[in-house]
Amino acid sequence: MRSKYMLSEYDNVKNGKVRLPEEFKDGVGKNEKGAVQIFQNVCSRTIMVEMMVDDTSMVGRMGTLGPIVDYGQKDKDAVKALNNVCPEDHVVVGMIGE
């Protein structure tokens, strides 16, 4: 949900109309560069989501207790589709920053 919210604010950031700037890591700018930073951050999050969906034992290694969840093929396909639209360079920059 966090990624969905961040992406929904892309145009607001790009157009300098950020409603809640404190919601964004490092206070992204209010321009095209800030909007790209949001996209890169969202893309980097897809790596973690993919690992959680594809390897349910990872959730246990992250310290989350509870039953193992089988996300099913529909969810796995959705995560794969999301990863396919994120350019690799944006994923890397989103993970390590500029």
Image (tube, rainbow, N blue to C red):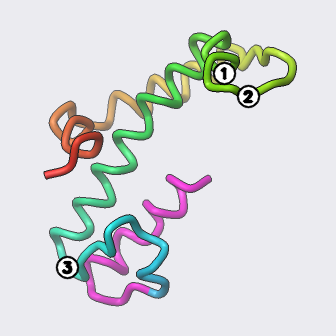
Give the residue pinned by disc 3: 31
Give the residue pinned by disc 1: 59
Residue drawn at point x = 23 percent, y = 42 percent: 96
Disc 3 marks a residue whose amino acid type is Asn
Quick one: label 3 or label 2, which is nearer the N terminus?
Answer: 3
- Is residue 10 within the magenta segment? yes
Instruction: Tell me: 63 left or right of 58.
Output: right
Between residue 91 and residue 11, name the one nearer to us.
91
The answer to whether the residue labelled 2 contacts the one labelled 1, judged by CB atoms less than 8 Å apart, is yes
Instruction: Tell me: 81 left or right of 37.
Output: right
Q: Secondary structure at mark 1?
A: helix
Q: CA distance from mark 1 to mark 3?
A: 36 Å
- Is residue 80 within the magenta segment? no
In the picture shown, does residue 79 fall above or below 37? above
| Residue 41 in the image, given as x and y percentages of width and height | 34, 50
Disc 1 marks a residue whose amino acid type is Val
Disc 2 marks a residue whose amino acid type is Thr
Give the residue pinned by disc 2: 64
Q: Which mark is residue 22?
A: none
Magenta range: 1-18
| Residue 94 in the image, given as x and y percentages of width and height | 27, 45
| Residue 25 in the image, given as x and y percentages of width and height | 38, 65
